[in-house]
Amino acid sequence: MGDEEKKSSGVPSGAGSEERDQWQDTDAGSPTTQQMRTIGQRRREAERKLDQHLEEAKHKAEAADPDDQKTES
């Protein structure tokens, strides 16, 4: 019984070892270095995507209202 408790990580048996390791808690409960890198990468990608969407929206607004841009000067 003791061996089975050590092997069980609370993750379904179909999950790959990468998934198990990625979300496994550390002693202090803080994220691992790899988890922090992944979070940082996802955050940078999300910010880049948001900037791209904002630029596209800005250009669409300029193209739709060219007269409004001239009268603001």
Image (tube, helix red, strand yellow):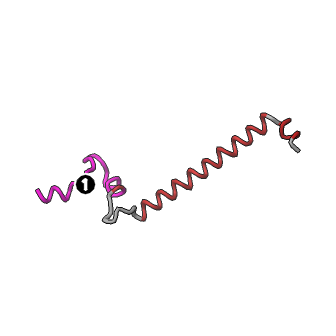
Q: Where is the N terminus found, in terms of image quarters? A: bottom left
Q: Which stretch is magenta?
A: 1-22
Instruction: Tell me which amino acid carries mark 1.
Output: Ser
Residue 68 included in the magenta stretch of the image: no
Residue at 30%, 65% in the rendered image: 27
Residue at 78%, 34% in the rendered image: 64
Residue on which disc 1 sits: 9
Q: Quadrant of residue 34?
A: bottom left
Q: Nearer the viewer, residue 28 or 5?
A: 28
Left or right of residue 47, residue 63 in this image: right
Q: Quadrant of residue 18?
A: bottom left
Residue at 65%, 49% in the rendered image: 51
Q: Secondary structure at mark 1?
A: loop
Point out residue 26 in the picture as x, y percentages from the top left corner. Answer: 32, 63
Numbered label tally? 1
Residue that sits furthest to the left in the current view: 1
Q: Nearer the viewer, residue 25 or 14?
A: 25
Left or right of residue 40, residue 70 in this image: right
Residue at 80%, 35% in the rendered image: 65
Question: Relative to 62, does residue 11 appear above or below in the rendering?
Answer: below
Q: Where is the C terminus found, in terms of image quarters? A: top right
Point out residue 17 in the picture as x, y percentages from the top left corner. Answer: 31, 55
Point out residue 30 in the picture as x, y percentages from the top left corner. Answer: 38, 63
Q: Quadrant of residue 69?
A: top right
Point out residue 52 in the picture as x, y percentages from the top left corner. Answer: 65, 47
Residue that sits furthest to the top in the current view: 64
